[in-house]
Image (tube, rainbow, N blue to C red):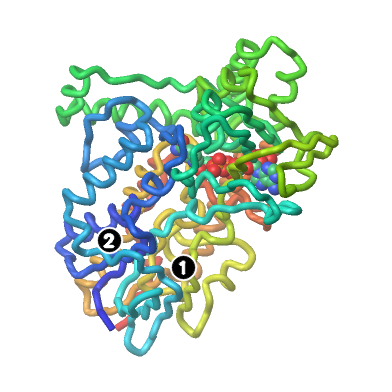
Amino acid sequence: MQQYKVIIIGSGFGGITAAVNLREKEIHDFRILERRSFMGGTWCQNTYPGAAVDVQSPLYSLSFEPYPWTQMFAEQAELETYTNYVIDKHRLREQTDMETNVTRIHWEEEEKLWYINTSKEKYKAQFVISGSGPLSTPVIPDFKGKDSFQGASFHTNQWDHSYDYKGKKVAIIGTGASATQVIPAIAPEVKQLYVFHRSPHWVLPRPDYKFSKFQQKLLRINWIYRLLRSIIYWSLETRVIGFKYSPFLLKLFGQKKALRLLKKSFKDESIREKLTPDFTIGCKRILLSNTLYPAYCRDNVNLLFKDQGIKEITPKGISTMDGQEIDLDLIVYSTGFDVQNSMISYPVIGKNNSALSEVWADFPRAYLGSAVPNFPNYFIITGPNTGIGHTSAIFVIEAQMNYIIDSIERTLQSEYKSIEVLAEAEEEYTKMVHREMEKTVWNNGGCQSWYKGASGKVTAMFPGFTFTYQRLAKNFRQDHHSFMP
Ligand code: NAP
């Protein structure tokens, strides 16, 4: 059994940031466990046609690794290159075990160690940092007859590049952020594309911009990169005012713009009506696209709405509620991720044999979205209520790292072996989060989204400014923790 001071689960931006931050504090005794055959997480896994980031790249990048981006909203290939550039620059491959899927971890109180079972070896570690990512378990709903389909089918998250979709009859189910990027990318090349909307989403123009060679040179100058980052950060941060405090502002600045885009894109009022969501903009993730609606106007693209929804998947294609029999070669499932049930994708057994899944039976909760009472020395990256809908998730990961690395460093520098958040501190934090959540658009906007769990509580989002979260994470509270010898 191998033993390390710290085990990091996952090698996406969360795991990468944790590793680099540990090294900065001279903590070198760590190992990264990655379940896939490649490192990098989201942008190395989501390779569907059209994949691109929807937050400006100079901000959607690690603060300690600026990059001369070729465009404002980088495409998947460039993001994959960037991720690998960071991994290689920091020599993280040599401290990573690949194809090592964590199957269970449990805390041994006597030894003050975590035991980590994986698909390969077993490990022991004093600390575990979990960066398995909330959007990593794709969901395919159990449509009647799904397995009888004789054509090809796959989820956007597991795009099969060996399948040639050119000239084929293709259906795409779902119209969220992933579908919005796939549809315009494949529409010109397929014979027919059938787009199944269960509900329409709000779409805003995408202010993309290609950097010239000269501008890319400027991006290599540190202070210019940082200035651009700050400008983007503060302009995006103002959106929280709408999300949290003012549906009026959301409607004034967001919804009106989205309605204008609809009007400009479609002459037919009945189509516009069908594509107009019945919830307040921002309740679900706002989609940014200049190419989705033009793709919808193509002759080979067929829009199917709720009353033409999927009745059954048949060996040849899809039967719809209104009696159509659609022959298909390929079904693309763009039906999202299981965020609520697979925030942590392996069983975690803490003190007194308590299972994290039971502690979270009502809803997932954690102090700063990172630490749970009775689970000493265990930290979750992008845990409950750390999501954001308006800015860079990487900014939040880096903010969270202040708390996680600080906790580990304080423990290692003390005479104690473990650190644990106090139940009262977690309770108080969680109450504050859900009190602040009450008036947000994610709670009141009139939609059901992956931000909300079965409890009806919004458990994915942080209800406030990211600088508020950053301040909380930076300000380590000794009185909120107990240390044990
Ligand atoms: P999603 O936003 O959850 O969308 C899932 C889609 O599938 C929705 O349109 C949903 O309809 C539909 N659907 C689900 N179950 C269905 C069923 N049983 N029958 C018919 N339709 C069904 O998933 P996603 O598009 O993969 O995006 C997930 C998240 O990933 C995003 O919110 C975003 O945070 C992230 N993402 C980011 C980017 C980026 O540009 N950075 C790109 C892609 C994804 P309803 O709306 O009616 O539920």
Tag 1 residue: 372
> Can the viewer see residue 182?
yes
**171 sits left or right of 304 in the view:** left
Give the image location of residue 198, x and y in percent.
Answer: 71, 38
Secondary structure beneath disc 1? loop
Q: Say which quadrant the N terminus sits in.
A: bottom left
Report the image quarter containing ligand 1. Answer: top right
- Amino acid type of the residue that numbered disc 1 sits on in the rendered structure: Val
How many marks are shown on the rendered structure? 2
| Mark 2 surroundings: few (<14), some (14-19) or many (≥20) residues within 10 A | some
> Can the viewer see residue 475?
no
From this view, report whether residue 4 is shown above or below residue 166: below
- Amino acid type of the residue that numbered disc 2 sits on in the rendered structure: Asp
Q: Nearer the viewer, residue 93 or 358?
A: 93
Say the numbered circle drawn on residue 430: none
Give the image location of residue 51, x and y in percent.
Answer: 44, 36
Secondary structure beneath disc 2? helix
> What residue lies at 52% left-to-right and 56% top-to-bottom?
137
Residue labelled 1 has its Cβ within 8 Å of some atom of ligand 1: no
From this view, report whether residue 199 is shown above or below residue 372: above
From this view, report whether residue 56 is shown above or below residue 121: above
Residue labelled 2 has its Cβ within 8 Å of some atom of ligand 1: no
Tag 2 residue: 406
Farthest residue, direction right: 323
What separation in Å lies between label 1 and label 2 (alpha carbons)? 16 Å
Rendered image quadrant of residue 127:
bottom left
**86 sits left or right of 238 in the view:** left
Q: Nearer the viewer, residue 197 or 257?
A: 197
**93 sits left or right of 186 in the view:** left
